[in-house]
Amino acid sequence: MKINPVEIILAKRNGAKIGKEALSAFIRGYLDGAIPDYQMSALLMAIYFQGMDKDEIQALTLCYIDSGQRIVFTGDLPTADKHSTGGVGDKISLMLAPIAAACGLYVPMISGRGLGHTGGTLDKLESIPGFQTRYDTAGFQQMVERQGLAMVGQSATLVPADKMIYALRDVTATVESSGLITASIMSKKIAEGARSLVIDLKVGSGAFMPDLAHADVLAESLIDTGAGFGQKVSVVFSNMNSPLGQYVGNALEVIEAIEYLKGNPLPDTEEITNALVTQMLLNAGLATDPTQAQTKIDQVMQSGKALQKFEEMVIGQGGDPRVIENYALFDGARYEVPVKAERDGFVGHIDARQIGYALIRIHAGRMKVSDVLDYGSGAHLMTKIGNRVKAGETIGTVFANDESKAIEVSQLIRAAYHISPEPVSDQPLILKIRTSQ
Amino acid sequence: MKINPVEIILAKRNGAKIGKEALSAFIRGYLDGAIPDYQMSALLMAIYFQGMDKDEIQALTLCYIDSGQRIVFTGDLPTADKHSTGGVGDKISLMLAPIAAACGLYVPMISGRGLGHTGGTLDKLESIPGFQTRYDTAGFQQMVERQGLAMVGQSATLVPADKMIYALRDVTATVESSGLITASIMSKKIAEGARSLVIDLKVGSGAFMPDLAHADVLAESLIDTGAGFGQKVSVVFSNMNSPLGQYVGNALEVIEAIEYLKGNPLPDTEEITNALVTQMLLNAGLATDPTQAQTKIDQVMQSGKALQKFEEMVIGQGGDPRVIENYALFDGARYEVPVKAERDGFVGHIDARQIGYALIRIHAGRMKVSDVLDYGSGAHLMTKIGNRVKAGETIGTVFANDESKAIEVSQLIRAAYHISPEPVSDQPLILKIRTSQ
């Protein structure tokens, strides 16, 4: 189909629906260089304002998938994956995938890197000496079929259209569109061969989705699009009003995940992980109800099978499995600077975004894609919402290899804790769950 | 000022106002290549949706002006210009400028070329053998000061920011924004040194502005912006429901304008031209009321002084003045093909846009900037709205150098005439006039 790009931009700008063929021609034109960045960015901004309907989102998702390879697992493997809209201290993938694989699921997880205030699973895993995340499609598929799970980066042959367009959205203020977000998430999760998908949709001031109403629109779009491709999708709406777990930082979070898999409790992270794995087991038919799913989870945790799956993955991807017993093999930090409470009172709101940005100064996160990370740096944040604190009490610790920067970060984290004179009751972690019919 | 372009796009996308310094830094960044096309086009689309307030339009206009040279005429010359939002058969500039100059005004007219269905004054003038339209700022200023009028193309040194951004808007469906239109028109008209400006704002189905409500928003924005730069602006809202005059085509329209200046009547064009020149004379203080202005216009028409100004301009810009007496010196057309009425009835609506596009096939207009024109081709359209016609009656003539194309165009023009069985009353040509206080 021969198209006039200006007419398509104009039609979307004026609120019209873009047909399947026209959309596909536009995306192909962009990929082969016939349509320049400036026309794509104008279309993206028009989509931001006018939205896309169910058919258009479906068509765009298909365009993304068709731009590259698509993995088809042999047999009827119960493949399932999880996607998170991104948080601070969110190491759930590191626990969820081994638990799910130990329960009999196959988890083909394509993960991302940290940018801005949010961390990335690939960066965390690469803090394990030797751990590899670059695999081609065939290598990735083999690992998943052999060991039940693998966590790799997006290869150039998987949904390249999304890769290019996401990079453009990032620099043109067109990220926050539920249609574009849906196509970006779902294309990757369908192309990677996951038969079902659970989404950890963070809601709250520190998250991508400011409120439940916006989150509901996105959830419906994700579920509908999955249905169009025969993929079962569940969305767990989780409250994002403080960092998850107690540690933020790459090696620190891997250690925390290992500790959890060894049986050490981690209340908030556990609640969300269990809810997500439960949905995965239900969608794959490996459990008939949430109680049965929870029993399976408890079994693989108690038997050590979940930890064993984690070890298999580390070995399978070239990492040093001795880290599981010897945390000294991770990069460390020379300096520890305490974070002290500003005043007496109760921890109200914790600004997770502000903490994420502060930690970039000690290279626990990155501002631009090219920034180099310090895997050993980060923070221990043991104080949670609702906790009573006294002025000057240690509420956290910053770990870094630059002492003056560590002091700066400690002060910025202190400012991210809002301490109220009145008792504060904690909010529920899981707000609701929506799932395909 | 150092800016983050993404933050500025994001702010506008979210409906915020962009500050003067930020806007100016964005435009400068774009001009020097630091900000790429794709960020500019995203900003333009965000502006399309969120609009700009008075201050932002004023600031953008100033950015455009400051990107190049600004002409300052010597002394207190009563400089005045006209701008038209574009029409089919619109040869008003060719008559208005000589009349205005004959009345004592100085008209520094920077004109454009035809594109799509609308024609351009520069193309029409270049159908006169030898006529030059490329002058630098100093040469243009000298001609205006010497002969009272000049019509040239936009030089590279005059508002280059508008030139670049207009080219980008054209290919990203971001033309139709009243704020962007205002900055584009007003920056040129202020930089060229016109102390007052009259705008022929075409309203109607065939025009840029579909209805009076949209036209009113643009008119107010033009008047306000002019006021901010000390320029008096009048807006004449004219009905654009049929081609203006009887001829469409480059040489054909110049001949029609010369005929008019020689005293041959041309009712619709005359009414609009007189209304526009009247506003120019009132704004410059060369007339105290419309009656006095009309008397002046009648005098210069009857005395031949207007025609003489036209001749002075042709000579001044290197054209052959003998064309005024000998139309055979213009390019001609080998073939004449009649346009016949489809049925008995009354001419209702005439689709001027459709006629403009049809004439591109015989090179009377162009589809892309690089298309070459045939000055001699065009059409004579003697039948006006309200006229009674009989089936098969000749309602027009196509002039072309390719007979089969001429037949095609004749059929397309026939289809542009909507003939109603009921009598049709013509609509008023001038809908209203708004002017600065």
Image (spheres, coloured by chain):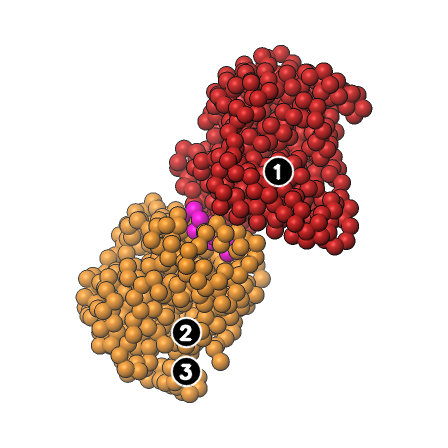
Chain colours: A orange, B red
Residue shown at 20% from the left, 70% from the top: A316
At 53% from the left and 68% from the top, the residue drawn is: A216
Three-letter amino acid code of the residue under disc 1: His
Q: How many marks?
A: 3
Element type at mark 1: strand
Does the stretch in magenta take in A179? no
Q: Which residue is mark 3?
A: A282
Taking the image as drawn, is residue B159 in sight?
no
Asked which quadrant contains residue B316, the reply is top right
Between the C-alphas of marks 1 and 2, the distance is: 59 Å
Name the kind of residue labelled 3 in the image.
Leu
Relative to B32, residue B47 above or below:
below
Mark 2 crowd level (few <14, some 14–19, many ≥20, 10 Å Cα) = some
Q: Say which of B398 and B298 sits in front.
A: B398
Q: Position of residue B346 (x, y in %)?
A: 73, 49
Residue A46 highlighted magenta (yes or no): yes
* Residue A353, percent from left and from top: 45, 55
Q: Which tag is nearer the camera, tag 1 or tag 2? A: 1
Instruction: Indicate the chain on which mark 2 is placed.
Output: A
Chain under callout 1: B
Q: Which residue is mark 2?
A: A229
Q: Determine whether the residue tagged by mark 2 lies in a helix, strand or loop.
A: loop
Region of the chain picked out in magenta, as a range: A37-48
Residue A161 position in % (x across, y down)? 36, 58
Q: Is residue A211 left or right of residue A255?
A: right
Residue at 47% in and 77% down: A436
